[in-house]
Amino acid sequence: MSATDSDFDFKGRSAPAGLLSWQKPLPALVFGLLAIKWFIPSCTAFLIYLFLHICFRSGKWTVPVLCLFFGLGFWYGNFSLPVRPAEMPAWMAAREKVLVSGRVSSVRAVPGNTLKILLQDVHCNSTEGVTRLEGYLNWTWAMPDKFPLPGQQVEFVGRVKPTIGFRNSGLWDYGFYNQSRNIFYRAYSRGHLENWALKPFLPNLLQRIRISLRRHIIDNAPADQGGAFFPALLAGERFYLSKDTVELVRRAGVSHVLALSGLHVGFVASIGFALAWLAGFVFPRLFLLISRLKLGVILAVPFVLFYLWLGQFTPSLLRAACMFGFWGLLLLLDRGRILMDGLFLAVFLILLFAPLSVFDLGFQLSVLAVTGIGLLFPFFRRLMPPGGNPAYRVLRFVLGVIYVSLCANLALLPVLLWNFGTVSPNFLFNVIVVPLLGLFVVPVCGFGGLAAAYIMPEAAQWFFSAGSTLQENLLSLIRSAAQNGFLPEYAFYRPLWEGMIGYYLVLGGLLFVLSRRFRQAGYFVFPLLVLLVLRLYPCMDHPGVRVDLLDTGQSQCVVITGPRGTRTVVDGGGGFGSFDMGRAVVGPWLCSGRLPEVDNVLMTHGDRDHAGGLAFLLEKFRVGRFFTNGDIPVGKLGERFNRVFESDGIIPSVIHRGDRIELEPGLVLEVLHPSEGFKGSTNDRSLCLRLVWNGRSLLGISGDLDRKGIKSVLGSGLDLRSQVLILPHHGSAGGFSPRFYDQVDPEFVLAACGMLNRFNFVAEKVRKELEARDIPLFTTADCGMITVVWGPDGELKRKP
């Protein structure tokens, strides 16, 4: 496609914007960078990109140049990726508390009164001496009583762990993401720290100015959630926002207003354009020398730079400011296509200096959103009603906001689904929230109040109070909509990589169809068929039984997939904080290439580390049957369970020893414990299950059984033999029983436990006993997610 037909075809109809010659290598470079993490998907996408260029009859040097840039991207990505330390220090493996000292690199305030502090030049003083840690340490400090400054030296006593966790196939790779940012260690503190110190530090001039600005924002903004928006919107500090508020904003589909990005740069740039309009109103002849648009760009530059500095040069703000700079430059040079050209220039510059930004979700979302708006909005613009009276102008404005949001979301859809596994079709609140924040709250109440704090202090609180009142009313409106069911949220199919590439191929072909360029649209059919074959080929494998023990930290979740594709979830993992394991890990994993459906859910007992993730599944998934030992969680978690039971009519089936649950013909879960009337602790009342397929015992699942529960199982006289055993109570000393191991007689055993967990599971005496019996042990702490597969003949086909 040539540059001359990139915006309009020969009949003047809008056409998809084509790539100019200088832009074509950039996607190849991006595919090369992505290949260091996702090699086969990236290579496939690159080959499809080459195929389309050949179909569109690009120049003879195009294919070699694209291959060169793909190779450069692959090399540059590998060259830039920090190397993870090979070994863990012995004191770290022993969970020893050490004296940590380091220099603050950055401080990020997050919801729930929490600081995320990156430390560099970190040294740990342990019983073995002083150890220097490579890379950064991510220190999470909840409810802090001090605010460290970048450049300041800090010391505190705590436990240090590697940044590894939740290693499940097809999900967000926390370890790789942190590695790409050179972060290899983490630590956690809460509240006032007894043994810690901030070294004396003299802030520089810019830091003192920022401290002063922050103090004026906090002192003048009301101490409610409406006022908590101002530190977030002006300086990127979401410290005072509650997690409930953030959840409401997310449900309303406007969570992007809380992440400093291109939207906020647009808010700030609008001040420059407003000043340009005001200057033209006062001096009309000014526009004879320079257009209002160009003057707006020039006047917006200092405000954008100030906001970039106030927001502490976060990566998202840097990207947005870079894009604004290129768009403004192209506009001043009277260039067309400023949206797409500016985007390509900004992306190229960012990747040149920070190639691993390509793995940052914020970078991916911002680039895709702008691309979607640039390519799709011209088609939606045709749907705008004509007319020049005020009513039509208002209607066009409202439709414009909706269409822009729709274009961005169409481009983002597969990436959002893959990362979060849920969809919230609630973008209508953008029509209300975005204009109010952009035209009034940020420029008038925020920056106006901040200026007044230095010029007219008595007026500053009025500005902030007005904005806070408006934001409180918006939150009340959103809360009311959520309570009345007007903000639905659905778990949804998470596309595999073939589906993601296929989605964008369909979207690209659709653009050509809408432009009536049907021959070019046909070029997209062949790669779609190839992707379909790649997707269906693994499904031709002979069916068997698959068991996945997910990596859910210090908790447990087992997923059983039968030969006919039925899925049974035994426990859902969980934690003891506000982290929702179902939403973040279990739900997305179950939706990978599958609809959000589960045939059976079993809850061995009601403790949070086994039941916490099940609430999300019951709320968002289609669940066939739900089984329990009779216990239901208490507190807020129990309230979620009970609400679902009432709203969806789910009736928990209480099962006891002797019951059999047929998952598929020939595939059965036998209930070995508890017997009716059994009295014991919550752990000892856990369900103990055995998976049997066509008479062959495959797997034993023993919940959190401790001594009394295990004694009851052993005294039942039932056949306990299984090829594989999931250890009782994560391998704790309380679940230690040599006689139980003898009765089960497993080929190997599994344990679900967190890396360097505070309970020291698996207990040392359990490890030694298994070693003495020559029974291999595999844990999620060491291996991540563990998968075991039995072939059609019942033989073990895949071991850990």
Image: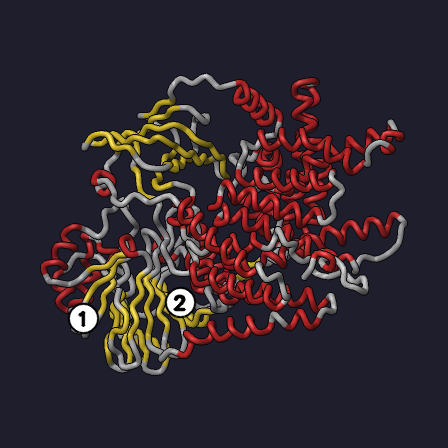
Residue at 55 percent of width and 41 percent of height: 316
Q: Is 381 left, or right, of 591 in this rendering?
A: right
- Is residue 404 among what the camera can see? yes
| Up-down relation of residue 313 to residue 23 (above or below) | above
In primary-sequence order, the first of circles 1 and 2 is 2
Q: Residue at x 45, y 54 (%)?
A: 584
Question: From the image, which quarter does the C terminus lie in?
Answer: bottom left
Q: Are marks 1 and 2 in contact (CB under 8 Å)?
A: no
x, y percent for residue 111: 50, 39
Q: Amino acid at mark 1?
A: Ser
| Residue drawn at x 36%, y 61% as measured from the top left | 571
Left or right relative to 322: residue 404: right
Q: How many marks?
A: 2
Dividing the image into 4 quarters, which one contains the N terminus? bottom right
Residue 256 locus on image (x, y percent)? 60, 46
From this viewpoint, which residue is outermost toward the left? 772
Point out residue 15 in the picture as x, y percentages from the top left corner: 73, 61
Q: Secondary structure at mark 2?
A: strand
- The secondary element bearing badge 1 is classed as loop
Where does label 1 land, which residue? 716
The mark lying in front, picked from 1 and 2, is 2
Instruction: Determine which residue is flagged by label 2.
Output: 601
